[in-house]
Amino acid sequence: MTRKSRKQRPEEHENLDRWLVSYADFITLLFAFFVVMYALSSINEGKYRVLSDSLNNAFRNLSSEQLTLPPGSPPASVIPAPVPRPKVADELKGRQRDKMRNMAKDIMQALAPLVREGKVRVLETSRGVTVEINDSVLFAPGQAKLEPLSISALSAVADVLAQNEFPITIEGHTDNVPIHTPQFPSNWELSAVRATTVLRLFAEAGVPQDHLTAIGYGEQRAVESNDSVEGRARNRRVTILINALEPEAPPQVLTEMTAPVQEGR
């Protein structure tokens, strides 16, 4: 009696074509890669330049801003400092310039006869408005007392100045001819007293005293040569400077003074 033979499973053949699946996947990925590369290479050049310029400007502005760190904040919380508004500053300067120009016109109208005679000059400069008055209109030779006719002219100027908030500097100037009197030992004293006399009239006419400053320069700031009669007459003058308002720079406080180290001999 023979044993019943077990059924034998047919031997499985090894699938030699499985590598085709991996190869197909690789080819698909490679094709997708080249499609992406082609798409990137066909970007509009103009749009790319616009994007590049925008990024450059953004990073440039960020690097130029001052960065401040609040006390107690971690280093990661760096906050950019507020950027000043140049448009606002320009508008303020423009309004101030218009106000100064209108004030110069009012002064010219108040002194119109003297302007026509060449005794008064009104100039608009970067510093403000300059009113230059020949001393023959204001004072007798070698004197610092105002002539009666000049008081009304200066009072008209004071009425214009009293309506504005600009600081005013009054300068006295002389020629190079020396003066030696008991009241005025030199041209320094004469020019200073003349400037102070005009300042006092302005203050009495209503110009705020904290807006007024008087300076005597003597012969040190001549505008013409003193070699001629005309030049000396031009140099003898009183100048009224109406200064434009400028923001004051923050004061710098020196907290520590260090002496230079001297090397031992």
Image: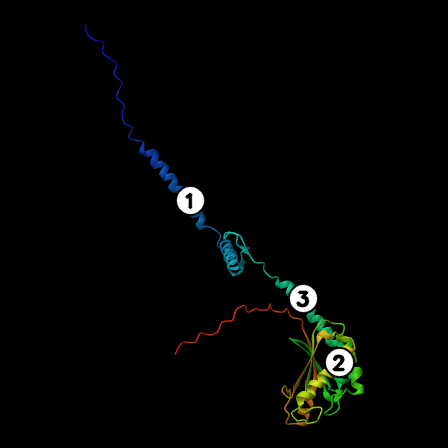
Pick whichever of labels 3 and 2 is earlier in the sequence: 3
- Residue at numbered disc 1: 35
Q: Is residue 92 above or below residue 181?
A: above
Q: Which residue is mark 2?
A: 200
Residue that numbered label 3 is attached to: 92
Q: Is residue 63 visible?
A: yes
- Residue type of the residue flagged with mark 1: Val
Q: Position of residue 122 (x, y in %)?
A: 71, 80
Looking at the image, residue 69 sits to the left or right of residue 111; the answer is: left
Can you tell which quarter of the image residue 236 is in?
bottom right
Reply above or below: 220 against 248: below
SS at circle 1: helix
Badge nearest the viewer, 2 or 1? 2
Label 3 packing within 10 angstroms: few (<14), some (14-19), many (20+): few
- Percent coordinates x, y for residue 88 in the rendering: 65, 63
Q: Amino acid at mark 2?
A: Arg
Crowdedness near tag 1: few (<14), some (14–19) or many (≥20) residues, C-alpha within 10 Å: few
Q: Is 96 on the left or on the right of 73, as rendered?
A: right
Looking at the image, residue 205 sits to the left or right of residue 1; the answer is right
Tell me the tag on residue 260. Answer: none
What amino acid is found at the position of numbered circle 3 in the picture?
Answer: Leu
Cα separation between marks 2 and 1: 88 Å
Viewport quadrant of the C terminus? bottom left
Q: Residues within 10 Å of mark 2 (few under 14, many from 20)?
A: some
Label 3 element class: helix
Helix, strand or loop at disc 2? Answer: helix
Q: Quadrant of the N terminus?
A: top left
Q: Residue furthest left?
A: 1
Q: Earlier in the sequence, mark 1 or mark 3?
A: 1
Camera-nearest residue between 155 and 63: 155
Depth check, mark 3 against mark 2: the one in front is: 2
